[in-house]
């Protein structure tokens, strides 16, 4: 078929399935479609791409023997793991783009990375990452591996001069806050907490002031530019500032199943399971590596 744009009947003939099945795929948001003047239309290029990705015969991003493209959430221990990999396997270059957890899933879906780090908390189920994989990566074959559990909480000045005791203090008139970028798991966590306590984001001084890493949050606290910011315990220890724990969250690595047994991915996961990795995690503080390397989900 040479037509670039198809209607439902034409697509039915092209795919060899009945029109009812096509409507089902649209409803399940599996099939790329656009509605124009009340009728569904389909771009052939997008349909062909969807077929290729849904076949399970090859990953959306091509395997590379010397490059490992990583995206997703910022983490201090994760950075250390990448440094170890570069030293142990100089023939492989791991490239890490810190986009934030949610945006990382979209980067993965767009075929621009082999794996993504994520710690997204679903408000309803209280489950990490899996509901978001089901929502945004449902048409892919995915393996989710635990990276570590980590303590996330409030970073404050050493000695706690503002006498901050709980998350609710974020709304005090004398408290200056800093936030993480939209799409990050830490930003999502902050929004979960302000909803839980019935706090309006408009009442928070600094809600729209954004940075992209835990260390940036900590440095703003250390330099007395802000009083309050969410971050991980490891950042507080590195900067010698105080920390009020809020949650112990699960940080996972999301990988295309077709790439899971590739040489570079297995070398990466091998470090994750190593005594060296666990020793570094223990020294950084705030990490639980008992399940590191464990498969959490296999679609």
Image: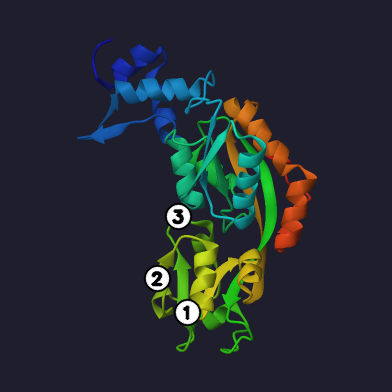
* Dot placed on the residue nearer the N-terminal end, 2 or 3: 3
Q: Secondary structure at mark 1?
A: loop
Q: Nearer the viewer, residue 1 or 88?
A: 88
Residue 114 image point, x, y percent:
53, 34
Give me the residue at 58% from left, 81% from top.
Answer: 157
Residue drawn at 76 percent across, 51 percent down: 278
Proximity of marks 2 and 1: CB atoms separated by less than 8 Å: yes
When asked about the image quadrant of residue 50, the answer is top left
**What quarter of the picture does the N terminus occupy?**
top left
Up the image or down, 166 lies above or below 107; here it is: below
Q: Could you tell me how far apart the alpha carbons at marks 3 and 1 are, in whole angstroms? A: 22 Å
Q: Which residue is mark 1?
A: 226
N-terminal label among 3 and 1: 3
Task: Tell me if residue 167 can be seen.
Answer: yes
**Mark number, residue 183:** 3
Q: Which residue is mark 2?
A: 209
**Mark 2, secondary structure of its residue:** loop
- Mark with earlier residue (2, 1): 2
């Amino acid at each position: 078929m040479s037509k670039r744009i198809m209607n439902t009947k034409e697509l039915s003939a092209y795919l060899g399935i009945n029109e009812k099945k096509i409507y089902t795929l649209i409803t399940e948001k599996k099939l790329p479609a656009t509605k124009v003047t009340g009728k569904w239309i389909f771009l052939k290029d997008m349909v062909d791409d969807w077929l290729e990705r849904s076949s399970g015969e090859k990953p959306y991003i091509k395997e590379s023997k010397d490059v490992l493209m990583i995206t997703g959430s910022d983490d201090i221990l994760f950075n250390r793991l990448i440094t170890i990999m570069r030293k142990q396997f100089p023939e492989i270059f791991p490239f890490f783009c810190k986009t934030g957890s949610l945006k990382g899933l979209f980067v993965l879906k767009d075929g621009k990375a082999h794996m993504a780090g994520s710690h997204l908390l679903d408000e309803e189920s209280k489950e990490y990452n899996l509901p978001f994989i089901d929502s945004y990566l449902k048409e892919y074959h995915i393996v989710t591996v635990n990276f570590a559990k980590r303590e996330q909480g409030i970073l404050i000045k050493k000695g706690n001069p503002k006498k901050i005791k709980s998350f609710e203090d974020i709304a005090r008139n004398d408290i200056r806050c800093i936030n993480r970028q939209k799409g990050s798991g830490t930003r999502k966590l902050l929004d979960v907490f302000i909803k839980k306590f019935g706090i309006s984001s408009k009442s928070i001084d600094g809600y729209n002031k954004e940075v992209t890493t835990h260390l940036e949050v900590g440095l703003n606290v250390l330099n007395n530019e802000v009083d309050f910011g969410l971050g991980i315990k490891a950042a507080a220890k590195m900067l010698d500032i105080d920390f009020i724990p809020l949650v112990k969250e699960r940080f996972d690595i999301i990988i295309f199943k077709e790439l899971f047994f590739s040489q570079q991915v297995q070398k990466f996961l091998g470090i994750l399971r190593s005594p060296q990795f666990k020793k570094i995690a223990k020294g950084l503080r705030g990490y639980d590596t008992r399940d590191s390397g464990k498969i959490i989900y296999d679609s």
